[in-house]
Amino acid sequence: MSHPQSYEILIVPEFTDEKAPGTEGAGGDATGSSVRGAAAKGSDGGGPGAAIRSAVVTATGETGETGYPRYAGEGMVADIDPRTQSVEGLLIDGSELAYGLAARIAERDRTQRDTDG
């Protein structure tokens, strides 16, 4: 399986309302409730859960402590499961993700690459 070479990591506030999307409760797939978050389409969602920070991370070729591929860039180091597109481990400027925040990822658009002119 080929892994994406880069992702955009979005740092978003967690939902605290039990009826908010991704908070199904016990036994559900509660996304956005920890480092793990649902894959995002982009960072322009607006409203609750809008990204407060983002970074483009690229594959380092290493495997992180979680056993997943490691990505790094713009002050973030992340272990990302490419199958589920979940952030399994994350450091931001050398520190763990603060409580109340969640990480989500979006695969980078391959057409955004720079071309030689």
Image: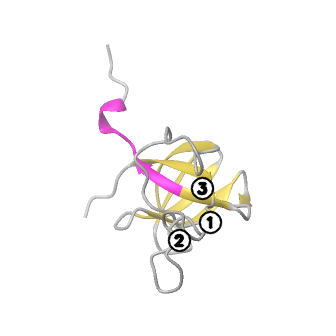
Q: Nearer the viewer, residue 56 or 42?
A: 42
Q: Are marks 2 and 1 in contact (CB under 8 Å)?
A: yes
Q: Which mark is residue 65?
A: none
- 3D distance between C-alphas at marks 3 and 2: 26 Å
Disc 3 to disc 1, C-alpha distance:
29 Å
SS of the residue under disc 1: loop
| Residue drawn at (65%, 44%) of the image | 52
**Residue found 65% across the figure and 65% down from its top:** 16
* x and y, in percent, of residue 4 in the image: 35, 52
**Sequence order check, earlier mark of 2 and 1:** 1
Front one among 21 and 82: 21
Identify residue for label 1: 17
Q: Which residue is mark 3?
A: 77
Amino acid type, callout 3 = Val
Name the residue beneath numbered marker 2.
Answer: 23
Seen from the viewer's position, the closer of residues 55 and 63 is 55
